[in-house]
Image: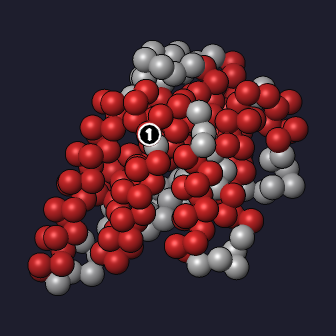
Amino acid sequence: MVTLSTPLILRAASMAQTAHAGQTRKYTPLPYTAHTTEVADLIATRSWATENDVAIGHGHDIKEDCDKAIYTRDFLARELNPAVADGIGMLTNPSKDHPELTRAQRKAMDREHIAELPANIQAIKLIDRCCNLGNLLRDPVPVDFMVLYLEESKALYRVLTKGVALDPEMAQRFQSTVAALQKKIQLAQNSGEITH
């Protein structure tokens, strides 16, 4: 288990707070950093994780969702370290630079990219997706989005082979969360509800 109070991890957490200031989680009033903190804290419990991995967890959405002019690779390398900067870069979906593509095309592009990543980065992505799916279980999310995100998550899981091999326990958590979300969707569809 990685100690959460190292200078690097504290810097990464602080940077995430600044970078995501004013952002909230989709469909909730929660600050966006509730998610990045959840991901980083979970990474810290894994036997394979390093201090760098936890810092990457805090910063994994910075380049996607924050000011690209500020949060460059050079800035992240200087403020955190080059390995963390590279990890954050690897977790940044390349499709963000292709808004002209359909959602399905963007997700396919991202899966192709993710399939080539090293095991620890894939495992971080697996943890990120487990947290996102867990949020769908808890939060009032439209059923059509849950269905779409669940199918996208299953497709993503199929390319996370190195991450799954590195952390089979997290892979089991993913499968359990998927099963629970499928039940939630089925209940919602059977009752005719829109958001639950």
Q: Identify the residue at image location x=65%, y=77%.
A: 101
Q: Quadrant of residue 180?
A: bottom left
Position of 186 with respect to 131 (left or right) is left
162 or 150, which is in the foreground? 162
Q: Identify the residue at image location x=48%, y=24%.
A: 44
Give x and y (percent) for residue 21.
67, 53
Q: Identify the residue at image location x=87%, y=55%.
A: 69
Position of 150 with respect to 54 (left or right) is left
The answer to whether 29 is drawn above or below residue 12 in the figure is below
Residue, disc 1: 161
Q: How is the image coloured?
A: secondary structure
Q: Secondary structure at mark 1?
A: helix
Give x and y (percent) for residue 178.
27, 53
Image quarter of the N terminus: top left
The amino acid beneath tag 1 is Thr
Q: Quadrant of residue 76?
A: top right
The answer to whether 60 is drawn above or below residue 136 in the figure is above
Give x and y (percent) for residue 102.
59, 78
